[in-house]
Image (tube, rainbow, N blue to C red):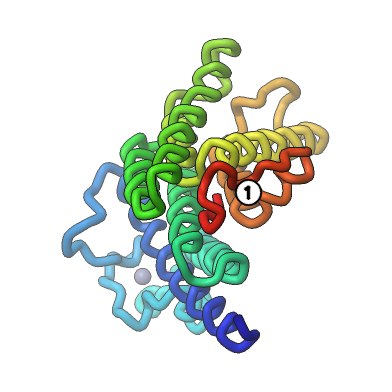
Amino acid sequence: MDAASRALHVAFSAMLGACLGSFLNVVAHRSVIGRPWWGAERSVCENCGRVLTLFELVPVVSWVVLRGKCRGCGAAFSLRYLAVELTGAVMAGVLAWRWGIGWAYLLSMIAAFGLFLNSLTDFETGYVFDSFAAVMAAAGLIARAFGGWWALLDGLIGAAAGWGVVAVIILASRGGMGWGDAFLMAGVGALLGWKMALISFYLGLMCGAVAAVWLMLRGKVKWGRHDAIPLVPYLALGGLLTLLWGPRILAFMGNMYIGKPFRTDWPF
Ligand SMILES: [Zn+2]
């Protein structure tokens, strides 16, 4: 692929990612407060209740142009909107850069934004919705069905492995992780296959552990209170790292049988 079309893919994907981030922000918030996110309910200013116009809802651009303030009442919009939209843009951009446009891109986008959505609800309330994980698993298995029986089988084993590894931790540690995390990892396994799911989980725990130690050293969290830190964002970070460098990490760990007996044109 030449540099120009690659740059075009990345730019297009980044715009798509910003829109997806903006949409998932609404889905996460309305799920948490128990309102439907589908249907015709318009976005309003949380301060004055004015219905926002299309011009005010363009991801990233509107926030920057309006300097994060409501045009009606001047109240500041939460920085969360900008952060979520920018994160979505960056994630989708790097995934397009890594995979180009194709099946691998589709699978990695579903995985990344599924994890992102669960991170948002975990940040807001510490709650993970099983329904989101179920959608991830279904999407992964449907997409894999197009890749042949081996790809589908890898997704099924992945779902079992992702669920199982968290289940073992729950039963062994009595707390720290919940069944929501198990279903989320089942969704990741269905999308990424069992090897990448386990790497993703391992990287997520490592990122979480590093962050926990850092927060404890800075005195933000009491020693030993690991349950005070939302875990899903770190699982998401592990997932994103895996989507970008998983096969290389696996090779680094000494596994020389990447992709076999799975289809070699199937990246996960
Ligand atoms: Zn307002």
Q: Is residue 259 above or below residue 130?
A: below
Residue sticking out furthest to the left: 40
Quadrant of the snapshot with the N terminus: bottom right
The residue to which callout 1 is attached is 242
Residue sticking out furthest to the bottom: 4
Figure label count: 1
> Could you tell me if residue 144 is visible in this image?
yes
Residue sticking out furthest to the right: 217
User: Residue at coordinates 39% horizontally, 79% vertically from top-left?
Assistant: 71
Q: Which image quadrant for residue 52?
A: bottom left
Q: 10 and 34: which one is in front? A: 10
Q: 42 and 1: which one is in front? A: 1
Q: Is residue 58 above or below residue 200?
A: below
In-image side of 99 versus 122 (left or right): right
Residue 3, x across and y down, in percent:
65, 85
Q: Is residue 178 above or below residue 91?
A: above
- For the residue marked with disc 1, what is the amino acid? Thr
In-image side of 264 versus 224 (left or right): left
User: Residue at coordinates 56% horizontally, 38% vertically from top-left?
Assistant: 197
User: Residue at coordinates 49% horizontally, 63% vertically from top-left?
Assistant: 105
Residue 251, x across and y down, in percent:
74, 45
Other residues around mark 1 within 10 Å, as few (<14) / some (14–19) / many (≥20): many
User: Residue at coordinates 64% horizontally, 45% vertically from top-left?
Assistant: 258
Q: Is residue 226 above or below residue 56?
A: above
Residue 167, x across and y down, in percent:
50, 19
Residue 226, x across and y down, in percent:
66, 26
Could you say whether the residue bearing mark 1 is in a helix, strand or loop? Answer: helix
Q: 191 and 209: which one is in front? A: 191
Residue sticking out furthest to the front: 261
